[in-house]
Image (cartoon, rainbow, N blue to C red):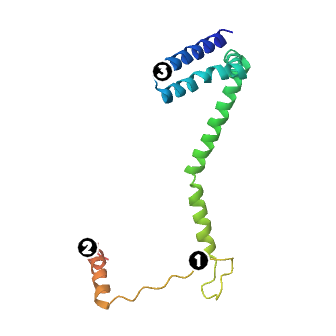
Amino acid sequence: MIAETVCSAVAAAGLGIAAVTAYRRRFLAAARIAAYALVPLGLVMTGVVEWAADTAFSPTAWAGFAVLGGAWALFMTTRAVERRRGGGTRKERRAAARSAQAAAVAPAASAPSLGQGARPASRPAAAPRAAASEDFSDIEAILKKHGI
């Protein structure tokens, strides 16, 4: 009862401010103020305020919120455990499934054996021998350093 009275008073005050604003020829601002002022009145008329007041003072409603919070905590805990075990995100699992499907295609097969796999990429041109020996010189130096 008190909440309805307060909301009605707020709506009446807001409409009064909107009227003063319109009198000053600021019609756009007055219309916006009137819209905001009518929201509490609409909430009272639809019964949302009464429902909220009944919910705020109901032990059953608070128990329901506690159950919802527990369900949310359980859900988030299971997601965290799933990620730690290596489940990864949905995108990562899909990418892994696609790569496994592409790997299932026989290397000498003329057509993919499992649906549409990845198309073979064109091989880059072979590098000259000098560039290849330069790449291995670092590796040879590391191996010699460790006595291998």
Question: In this figure, what is the number of numbered marks?
Answer: 3
Mark 1 belongs to which amino acid? Ala
Q: Residues within 10 Å of mark 2 (few under 14, many from 20)?
A: few
Q: Are marks 2 and 1 in contact (CB under 8 Å)?
A: no
Choose between 38 and 82: the one closer to the eye.
38
Mark 3 belongs to which amino acid? Thr
Going from N to C along the chain, the mark reached first, 1 or 3, is: 3
Determine which residue is flagged by label 1: 118
Residue drawn at (55%, 14%) of the image: 13
Q: Where is residue 133 shown, x and y percent of the image?
A: 29, 86
Choose between 42 and 70: the one closer to the eye.
42
Q: Residues within 10 Å of mark 1 (few under 14, many from 20)?
A: few
Choose between 120 and 108: the one closer to the eye.
120
Q: Where is residue 144 shown, x and y percent of the image?
A: 27, 77
Q: Residues within 10 Å of mark 3 (few under 14, many from 20)?
A: some
Picture quadrant of residue 57: top right
Q: CA distance from mark 3 to mark 2?
A: 85 Å
Determine which residue is flagged by label 3: 21
Mark 2 belongs to which amino acid? Lys
Q: Is residue 137 above or below residue 57?
A: below
Q: CA distance from mark 2 to mark 1?
A: 42 Å
Residue drawn at (63%, 14%) of the image: 8
Residue drawn at (71%, 26%) of the image: 64
Q: Quadrant of the C terminus?
A: bottom left
Query: Tag 1's secondary structure?
Result: loop
Query: Which of label 2 and label 1 is nearer to you?
Result: 1
Residue drawn at (67%, 26%) of the image: 65
Residue 145 is tagged as 2
Q: Where is residue 38 shown, x and y percent of the image?
A: 61, 22
